[in-house]
Amino acid sequence: MIVESRSKPAPEARAAARGALSINDLHKSFVIGGTLRPVLEGINLDVKPGEFVSIVGASGCGKSTLLRLIVGLDDQYGGEIRLDGERVATTSLDRGIVFQDHRLFPWMTLEQNIDLALLNTDTPKARRAQIVADHIALVNLVGFEKAYPHQLSGGMAQRAAIARALVTEPKLLLLDEPLGALDALTRVHVQNELQRIWMTQRSTMVMVTHDVEEALYLGDRVIVMAPSPGRIRRIVEVDLPHPRDRGAPLLHRLKDEILSELMAGPGETDNLVRLPEREKR
Amino acid sequence: MNAVLSKPWLRLAIGLVAPALLLIWWQWQASSGDVRSIAFAPLGSIGGAFLELVENGSLVSDMVSTLSRSLTGLVIGGALGIAVGVAMAIWRPLDRLLGPLLHAIRQVPLIGWLPLLGLWFGTGQGSELIVVSLSAFFPTMLNSYEGVAGVEQRYLDVGRIYGFGAFQRFRLILLPAAMPLILTGLTQALAFAWIASIATEILLGIGSGLGVTMQLAQTQQRIDIILVTVIATAILGFAVNYLFRQLRISLLRWQPASL
C-alpha cells in the first residue's frame, strides 16, 4: 500500500535488493566477572529476501544478543553480518526491531510514537501523517491515535510497536519475543495479524521466540539454538504455504520434534529423529 | 467514607474543621486572662489590624513584593538549576568538574551565606535575590540531574534505531523522560524560594515584604500585625503551591494516575 508511492523497480529486482541477510562465522563474547564468556559461537545463517525465519532456544542461548547485533545496537563482534552485502556496524533505518516490551515513549501519543520513526527519513511532512494513519489502520488501532501508551492494553501497545517498526519499511524486521508478554488469546490474535502483515509486505523477518508453536506457525524456517555458548543446533524447514492452519498435522509433528530436541542435553543431537522432509532430499 | 469524600463541598468543609478548631482555641487563650494571653491577640484585634493593613495598602504591596521576589528567584535559580543539572547528567566531565564543589556548597544552610553575601553585595535587594535564587537552584539542579541520568537505556536504544541526532535525543527522549523529576525539583524549589524570601526579609529588613513587616511589627510589639502577616504568608504560599500542582498535573498528563 505504501510501497506504491515510491519508485517501482521490477519485482524480481526489488526482491533481490531487499533484505538478504547473511551471517558468517559470527562470534560474540561478554566479560562477566573478569572472565571472557562466549555467548555466540560460529553462527552461520543466510536469510533470503522476504523470508520469515523463527529462532527458538532455551533462555541464555544468545537469541536476543544475536538480534541486538543484527540491528546494530552492539558492534563488538567477530565474524560478519551483512544485509544486502553491506556490513552491519551501527543502526540503520533499513533494519527495524520490535522488542518484547513495546518501548513506546510514555510521553507521546500513539500517533506521535509512530511518527517519530519517520523523522529522519526523507518523507515529506505532509505524507508522514498519511503513512502513520495507514499503519495505525494496518494494526487495527484506528480511534486510538491520541491515546497515551498507558491507556492502551498490552496487546494494543505491542501492535503499535509493530506499526512503528513497519512505517520505515525496513528491508529487515527483527522481532525479539514480540508477543512474549501477551496473554494466550491476544497472542494468537496478534500472531494472525503478524502473518497477514508479513504476507502483504513481504519484507524479511527474523523472530526470536520461546514458543515453538508460534515459531512454526509463522516461520518458513525455524532455527533451533543450543545454549552456552549459543550456537545453531538445527534448522527446520516448514514446508507449508501461508496463511497456515494451526491444526496442520505437520506443525504438530514438527513441534514435538523440536521440543524433544530442546529438552535433550547437548551432544545428543545425533540420536534425534530425522525429519521426513530431510530424508527425502 | 470514600463516598463522603467524593462530594467537593464536603471535602472543603472537612478541610476547614481543623483551622476552625484552632481559631476557637486561640480565642479562648486570648481571653483567658493568663500572663501568656498577651501573645494571643484576640481575633477581633487581628481583624482590625487586617483592615488597617488593607486600607493603607501595605498588605497588598507586601504580598506582591514577597511573591515577586520568590518567583524571580525561582525563575533565575530554577532555570540555572535545570541547565546545570541537565548539562552535568549529559556530559559527565562537567559532573566531575562541578559536582564536588556544588555538593559542598549545598551543605551550607542558605541563611549561612547571608553574612558573606552582605559583605560582597551589601545588605540590599541584590543579596536577597541571590539567596532566594540559590535556594531554588539546588533542588532543581539535583532533581534535573537525577532525571536525565536515570533515563532508561531501552528508550535511548529506540532513539538510536530511528537515527536520532543529539538534539532529537535531547528534545524527544531526555527532556520529557526527565520532566517528572524536573517538576519535582521545581516544586521543592518553589517552597525553598518562598521560605528563603521570608527569612531574608526578616533578617535584612529592607524594602517591603511580608517578612519586613513581621520584623517591624515585632519591634513594635504588634502581635496582631505579626499574625496578619503570618496568615497572609500561609494562605499565599498555599495558593501558589496549589497552582503549581495543577500545572504539574497538566504537564504530566501522559503519566498513568498523575500525582
Image (cartoon, coloured by chain):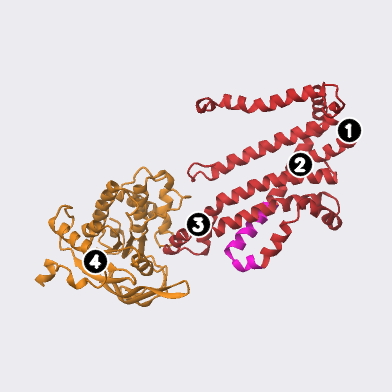
Chain colours: A orange, B red
Magenta residue check for B147:
no
> Which residue is under mark 4?
A264
Position above or below: B159 against A35 = above
The type of residue carrying mark 4 is Ala
Circle 1 — which element? loop
The crowding category of the residue bearing disc 4, from other C-alpha atoms within 10 Å (few below 14, some 14 to 19, many at least 20), is few
Q: Give the letter of the chain under mark 3.
A: B
Tell me how far mark 4 sits from mark 2, CA to CA: 76 Å
**Which segment is the magenta one?**
B77-96
Coordinates of residue B183 in the picture (x, y in percent):
60, 48
The crowding category of the residue bearing disc 3, from other C-alpha atoms within 10 Å (few below 14, some 14 to 19, many at least 20), is many
The type of residue carrying mark 3 is Ile
The type of residue carrying mark 2 is Thr
First in residue order: circle 1 vs circle 2: 2
Q: Give the letter of the chain under mark 4.
A: A
The residue depicted at 75 percent of the width and 32 percent of the height is B231
Please tell me in which quadrant of the rendered image residue B223 appears: top right
First in residue order: circle 3 vs circle 1: 3
Q: Give the letter of the chain under mark 1.
A: B
> Which residue is under mark 2?
B66
State the mark number for residue B221: 1
The type of residue carrying mark 1 is Gln
> Which residue is under mark 3?
B173
